[in-house]
Amino acid sequence: MSTFRDLHIAAGWFFIVSNAIVGGWAIAAQYIPGLRHRTLWWATAIAQLSAFATAVFGVVLVSSYDRELDQFHALYGFSTIIAIAILYSYRTSPFIKDKQYLLYGFGGLFLMGLGIRALFLD
């Protein structure tokens, strides 16, 4: 059990820190064109996909080891996945065309906040 719990916590911290980094990078890239690299989008994808890894480790913890689940922890955890889907759906919207870096910047910081909230509910 401790292995999956450790994996879940480590994945959660990776999710929080990586989304903070790419969120700040994307906001800065809105105003500093030199920061606009393809690497930003790869890093953003990795940061956001880590939410799914964190969720999988959490589901294994709850289903296989009869771990008690705080309902708000699950709410904030799974809200991150919904938020990622919403961010992704807005990426091609006409009114966001010139603000895509801000969308993903503030979106990354929002996701970081959801992760922090979920982490400290345990």
Image (cartoon, rainbow, N blue to C red):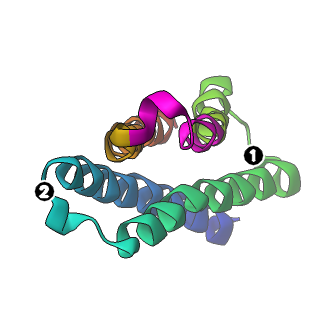
Q: In this view, does 72 lie above or below 89?
A: above
Q: Is mark 2 on a helix, strand or loop?
A: loop
**Residue at the disc numbered 2:** 32
Estimate the x, y position of residue 100 in percent, counting from the top left.
39, 44
**Residue 6 higher or lower than 121, as above or below:** below
Q: Give the range drawn in magenta.
A: 84-97
- Residue 94: say if magenta: yes
Which quarter of the figure is the N terminus placed in? Answer: bottom right
Q: Nearer the viewer, mark 1 or mark 2?
A: 2
3 inside magenta stretch: no
Report whether 19 appears left or right of 62: left
Relative side of 115 to 102, left or right: right
Mark 1 is on which residue type? Arg
Instruction: Check disc 1 and report the residue beneath it.
Output: 67
**What residue occupies the far right of the structure in this picture?**
64
| Cα distance between the residues tagged 1 and 2 | 46 Å
Displayed quadrant of residue 43: bottom left
Foreground pick, 25 / 10: 25
Is disc 1 placed on a helix, strand or loop? loop
Residue 45 visible at all: yes
The residue drawn where x is 79% and y is 58% is 60
- Main SS category, magenta section: helix
Category of crowding for the residue at label 1, using alpha-carbon neighbours closer than 10 angstroms: few (below 14), some (14–19), many (at least 20): some
